[in-house]
Amino acid sequence: MRVIINCAASVDGKIALPSRKQTRISSEDDIARVHRLRAEADAILVGVGTILSDDPKLTVKEKYARGKNPLRVVLDTHLRTPEGAMVLNDMAPTLIFNSLKDGSYGNAELFRCPENNGHVDLNCVLSELERRGIGTLMVEGGSTVIWEFLRQGKADELNIFLGDMVIGGRDSPTVADGRGAQSIEDIVKLEFIEARRMGGGVLLRYRLPS
Ligand SMILES: NC(=O)c1ccc[n+]([C@@H]2O[C@H](COP(=O)([O-])OP(=O)(O)OC[C@H]3O[C@@H](n4cnc5c(N)ncnc54)[C@H](OP(=O)(O)O)[C@@H]3O)[C@@H](O)[C@H]2O)c1
């Protein structure tokens, strides 16, 4: 399975306001690119933090791309996804990985995985997605989930759109929060693929060495 992390950040690396509220960072070209990527992916994954702050639909907008909506995947250890969350609508199937139970939750399917350091275990998540035939998984955030995919070496590619703005603020979430590298050995190394101008911003693509 190919795992692509995609996110949009300000020039200072912030991905939302200090309140954690979503703000538009991507250019129109970049939004179209993200929707094309979604349409080509088999699944889109986010953490419950993104569900709680942004309430995203995680579907493909017809305006930007044609194609089926991929499977929506949420990492939600203790089932904090609100009952009325958009990700539970009937526009696409949704799979919630949690550590409590199998079964269903609104339109979503629940799949139980063990906890690892207090969160759903990524090995369990990725092997179940592979078992279901997911060939390309797009990880769309937020910062805690991105850090875990990078730290655990579970991603093949990192795409960051850098918008033409500075958000600032010590409390604004960044591309990768979590605990971060505790020593030089923990720093996640990247291999540059390309930089592409898109509207007023720049798309940066990196490969993760295997
Ligand atoms: N600009 C962008 O491209 C973009 C995209 C998406 C989100 N965002 C922003 O990102 C922010 C949300 O980021 P966030 O860090 O608060 O939340 P997040 O990364 O979306 O979700 C983190 C939560 O996911 C759960 N989780 C379950 N298993 C996990 C695992 N194995 N590894 C990591 N997390 C796991 C944990 O909660 P439990 O322990 O309760 O399960 C964890 O606290 C918002 O401000 C949002 O606007 C920006």
Image: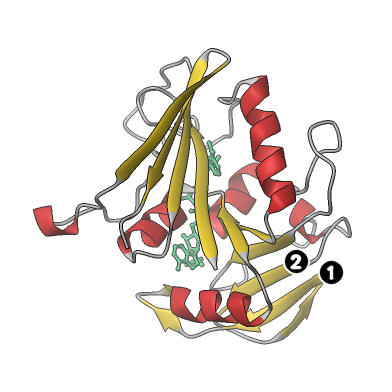
Res 19 seen here? no
Horizontal side of residue 127 vs 162, given as left or right: right
Sooner in the amino-acid sequence: mark 1 or mark 2: 2
- Give the residue number, with chain letter if any, for mark 1: 107
Residue 156 lies in what quarter of the image? bottom left
**Contact, mark 1 vs mark 2 (Cβ under 8 Å):** yes
Horizontal side of residue 105 vs 55, given as left or right: right
Q: Secondary structure at mark 1?
A: loop
Amino acid type of the residue tagged 1 in the rendering: Asn
Above/below status of 115 relative to 151? below
Q: Residue 141 at x, y = what percent?
A: 52, 49
Q: Nearer the viewer, residue 117 or 46?
A: 46
Residue in the image at 79% along x and 61% along y: 88
Above/below status of 183 relative to 133? above
Q: How is the image coloured?
A: secondary structure
- Which residue, as the protein is rendered here, is positioned at the far left? 184
Amino acid type of the residue tagged 2 in the rendering: Thr
Q: Nearer the viewer, mark 1 or mark 2?
A: 2
Disc 2: CA contacts within 10 A as few (<14), some (14-19) or many (>=20) = many
User: Where the N terminus falls, by quadrant?
Assistant: bottom right
Horizontal side of residue 29 vs 61, given as left or right: left
Above/below status of 64 relative to 149? above
Residue in the image at 65% along x and 70% along y: 134
Q: Residue 13 at x, y = what percent?
A: 37, 31
User: Where the C terminus falls, by quadrant?
Assistant: bottom left
Q: On residue 94, which mark appears? A: 2
Residue in the image at 37% along x and 46% along y: 176
Q: Residue 120 at x, y = what percent?
A: 48, 75
Residue in the image at 41% along x and 60% along y: 149
| Alpha carbon separation for disc pair 1 and 2 | 7 Å
